[in-house]
Amino acid sequence: MPGTIRIVCVGDSHTFGVGTSMRHSYPAQLEKLLALNNYEQKFSVFNLGIPGASTKRQAQELKLFFKEHGAEAVILLTGRNNDSELKGWMNNQPSRISQYHAEDLRSYRFIKAISGYFRKKNIYRDSQHNRVYEQRYSGYLNFYLEEIREICQDKGAKLILLSYYNSSDNLIKDFSYKYNIPYLDFTPDFESLFKTADSSKYISPDMSHLNRLGYKFFAEQLYGDLFLKQAYLGFQINPLLEEINPADFYSNENEVKQMIALQEERIGHSRGSFDYPFELVHLGHIYMEIGREEVARDCYTKALLASGYLDNNTIVSPIINWYLKKGRSKEAFEVCEEVLLHNPGNSIAGRYHDWLINQAH
C-alpha cells in the first residue's frame, strides 16, 4: 500500500467545527469520505482550525505544524477574523482592492467592516478613511496569504483556497488567480441547497456556523472538487461513490461521552480567558445535536454571562434562538432586554429586540 497522504486544513471556527463536535467538523468528515472511497490509499486529515484565528495566526500555526510534520496538501479557509488587526496594519504597497467596488465584494466580514461596523464605531467616516481601511485590508490579507503560499511552496505542499459556505472574497479569489492556486467557491452549492431544503437543518444555533449536516455537505463538495483537481494535487482520489450515513452521527454512546469530555476539558483549560464563553457555546451545540436541549440552554446562558454580554453573534444568538425555536418569544425578548441593560451597544441583541417588537405588532 502506498504511504499515507497528509492533508492539512487551516482556518478558524468554521474549520475547527464550531456548531458541532470536532469529530463532525468538515476536516473530520473529509477524512472519513476519503477512507470510505479509497480502500487502496490511506489519507490523514489534520484540523488546524482555531476559533477566532486571523490569517496571521493561521500562517503561524501552519509554520509550527511543518516544523514537526509534512503534508502533501494544505486547504485554507480564511478571512473572517482579521478586523481587529487592521487598524494598526501599515502597508504602503499599492492597494489592489481599489479595482473592485464595495458592492462587488462578497466577503461578509469586509462588507460589515466598511459599512455598519465602522459607522457604529465612528471610525473611517469619510471616503478617504474608507480607502485607508481598504488598503490595509488588501495589504494585510495579501501579505499573509503570500506567507502561507511560500510556506507551502517551501515544504512541497499544494495549496487550495476555500470560500465560506455563505460568502466568498474577490481578494482571495484574485490572489488564487495570480498564482494559479485553485479557489473552491461553495456559495452557489449552498444557495442551491437552501432553495430546496430548510436551511436551518444545516445551520448551528448561532445562525453563523454549520452543524454536522452542514459540514457533511461542505465536505462532500470539497471532496468532489479535490477529485477534479488530482492533476494539480499530484495524487489520486477515487470518485465520491459512498457518502457518510447521517444515522452514524452520535450513534456510538462511548464516542459521544468522549466528545463531551474533550470539550469539557477545553472549557476547563480556557476558564478565565477570552475563549471560555466560546468553548461553553461549543459544548452547547454538541448537547443540542444529541437532543439534550435543556443542558444546551444552560451552556448558552453561562456563556452569555461569562462573556460580559459581548457583542458577538456566536455568543448572543444561540440563547435567543433557543427560546424562539420553542415558540417562547417572551423569554427571548427578556434575554434581549437583559443583554441591552448590561451592554446597550450590543448590536446582536438590539437586532433581535427590534425584530421581536415588530413581530408583536
Image (tube, rainbow, N blue to C red):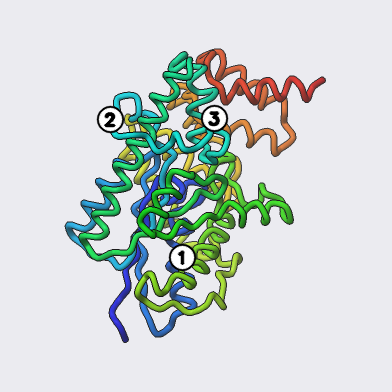
Residue 81, position as x, y percentages in the image = 40, 37
Mark linked to residue 30:
1
- On the rendered image, what quadrant is the N terminus found in? bottom left
Question: How crowded is the residue under tag 3: few (<14 C-alpha within 10 Å), some, or many (20+)?
Answer: many
Marks 3,2: beta carbons within 8 A: no
Which residue is label 3 attached to? 316
> Can you say whether 107 is above or below 274 in the image?
below
Kindly identify the amino acid type of the residue bearing the numbered disc 2: Asn
Q: Is residue 135 left or right of residue 251?
A: left
Front in this rendered view, residue 312 or 55: 55
Instruction: Say which residue appears at 51% left-offset and 48% top-offset.
Output: 164
Front in this rendered view, residue 166 or 337: 166
Q: Earlier in the sequence, mark 1 or mark 3?
A: 1
Camera-side mark, 3 or 2: 2
Which residue is label 2 attached to? 92
| Label 1, label 3: how far apart the Cα atoms are | 30 Å
Question: How crowded is the residue under tag 1: few (<14 C-alpha within 10 Å), some, or many (20+)?
Answer: many
Q: Earlier in the sequence, mark 3 or mark 2?
A: 2
